[in-house]
Image: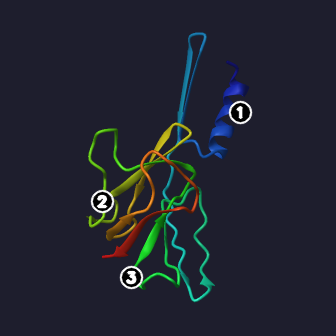
Amino acid sequence: MEFKEIQELIKIIDESNLTSFELEKEGFRLSLQKEVQKIYSREIVQQGVFTEPASGQMSAQALVQTSDMPKDRQTVDCPIVGTFYTAPSPGESPFVLAGSKVKKGDVLCIIEAMKLMNEIEAEEDLEILEVLATNGQMAEYGQPLFAVRQG
């Protein structure tokens, strides 16, 4: 593989959402990894007023409150399109269940996108009121995954 081709690959990976890339070709092995800074956003919807979410590479989660929800009930929404998983692997206990209390940084679920497992973490202390997504099913960007209450 030519140096120019390696530079082009690095540029493509840098501009994409990929966090790692490996290539093996005719005895040549290339492994690229980049660190992704998690950027949290919060989008609150009350009485028809929107606040814009923070921009960035990937939002780890968004807490959304709509006017038809009780004031203390919010949702954690899917930050990317992918497959929703409640547990680290089949047959293991789910990360959270309805009634679970989690601390900031605790893993809520995994979203698999492009064969990468993305752990979705709580951005603050939360109580899980309800799991809204189905394990093993596709989740769309912005789809509510959990109903939660702060604290």
- Disc 3 to disc 1, C-alpha distance: 49 Å
In the rendered structure, which amino acid carries the disc numbered 3? Asp
In the rendered structure, which amino acid carries the disc numbered 2? Leu
Q: Nearer the viewer, residue 26 or 144?
A: 144
**Total number of numbered discs in the rendering:** 3
Residue at the image point whose x is 27% and y is 67% from the top: 99
Decide: marks 2, 3 in contact (CB < 8 A)?
Answer: no
Kind of element beneath mark 2 = loop
Q: Earlier in the sequence, mark 3 or mark 1?
A: 1
In the rendered structure, which amino acid carries the disc numbered 1? Glu
Q: Earlier in the sequence, mark 2 or mark 3?
A: 3
| Mark identifier at residue 8 | 1
| Mark identifier at residue 72 | 3
Q: Is residue 133 left or right of 149 when viewed as pictured?
A: right
Q: Earlier in the sequence, mark 1 or mark 2?
A: 1
Image quadrant holding the N terminus, namely top right
Q: Is residue 107 left or right of 35 when viewed as pictured?
A: left
Residue 136, how many percent across, how many down? 45, 45
Residue at the image point whose x is 71% and y is 33% from the top: 8
| Label 2 sits on residue | 97
